[in-house]
Every structure is written in C-alpha cells, then in structure tokens.
Amino acid sequence: TDIGGTSAATGNSISFGSNTVIAVTYPGFGASQPVAGISVAHSQGLNIRFNTISSSISYTIAAGGINLAAGGATAPVGANYTNTVSNNNVTLSTVAIGNFPLATYLFGIDMGYGLNAGGFSATHTASNNIITLTQTIPTGASATTYAIAGIKANYNAGTASFQQNSIT
C-alpha cells in the first residue's frame, strides 16, 4: 500500500480536525483509536511518504499524524513485511484537558503494532520526517499526567529503524 508516492510532487496535503469522538467502529479499528491524518489498520508493506499532515484545530481528544493501528486485535500474521514512514511533515497541536489518557495523548507517528513470532517479523522504518507537536497544559494541571510522542513504537516488531527525524 502506497500513500504519498515517491516524491514531494506526488505527496498528499492533509488538514484534519474534529474534537468529537466518532461513535462508529470500523473493522480493524478499536473504539479507542485517535483521530489521525492517516490511519491504517492491519496492513503489511506500507509505504507512507512525502505527505504533509496538519491539524486545523487544537485537539481536546487523542490525536495523531500517522497511525498504524492493530485496532485492539493482533498484528498482521503470516508474512515478513516492512512498513516505511518517511519524508513526511506532521504539525499538530492539542489542549490537554485532563481526561487521561484519551484526551491527553498526542503523537506524530505511531507504529501501532509489530510482529516477532512464529518465524515472521515486521520491520518498521521511519526516516527524514519533520514532526512538530504542541501541547498546551491548562494552568494548575499536573504536567506528569499528559503524554506526547514524536514517534511511538513500543510494540514487538522484529526490527525498528528510526533515523534523521526532526521532532520538536
């Protein structure tokens, strides 16, 4: 699956925003999935490159730029595969309102699943991405209850390679 192509000329420009949790659950996405500019579930061999993703609002619910989701189920099985996320520009902002973790989680790229079992392995590669995240914490709130991640990849992938990303 290719989203964005092989050069800046073929990339997508995505501006999105909604502070309403969608009540519809699509196959492969759990009810707790954040809103995202690009969100893909249970896919193998992704190539997400040369996209510009921005939020049109400051979120008060969980939000992300690129979400590779397992949707509460298991990761794709039965193959070795590589997911590549590179040369993207992600700019998002949020206002943390205290409903941890749903309303306070902001990420640029979430490698939302991995596989390293049964002789099969996932490789996640993220390189040359520019990620700018801004989270406003209300006056008097505890800063330790809010989460922000430029690249989140805490799943059991066989190989993870993250190089030359700029995260602010």
Image (cartoon, helix red, strand yellow):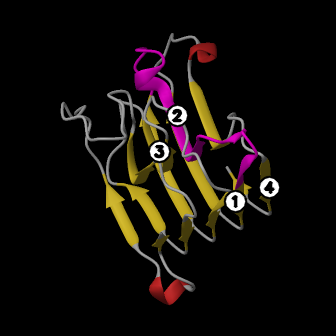
With 59 as the anchor, is 92 left or right in this view?
Answer: right
Dot placed on the residue nearer the N-terminal end, 1 or 3: 3
- The kind of residue on which mark 3 rests is Gly
Asked whether residue 34 is drawn in magenta, I would say no
For residue 61, side relative to residue 106 (left or right): left
Give whichever of discs 4 and 3 has the lower sequence position.
3
> Pointer 2: what residue?
74
Residue to which mark 1 is pinned: 126
Res. 161 mark: 4
The amino acid marked with disc number 4 is Ser
As measured in the structure, the alpha-carbon distance from the residue carrying label 1 to the one carrying label 4 is: 6 Å
Residue type, numbered disc 1 = Ala
* Residue topped by disc 3: 64
Report, in whole angstroms, how far the alpha carbon at label 2 lies from the one at label 3: 21 Å
Q: Who's the residue at 42% across and 58% down the image?
A: 54
Residue at horizontal 63%, vertical 38%?
149
User: Badge 2: how crowded within 10 Å, few (<14), some, or many (20+)?
Assistant: few
Q: Nearer the viewer, residue 38 or 52?
A: 38
- Of the numbered discs 2 and 3, the one sitting upstream in the chain is 3
Which residue corresponds to the image point at 57% horizontal and 11% vertical from the top-left? 142
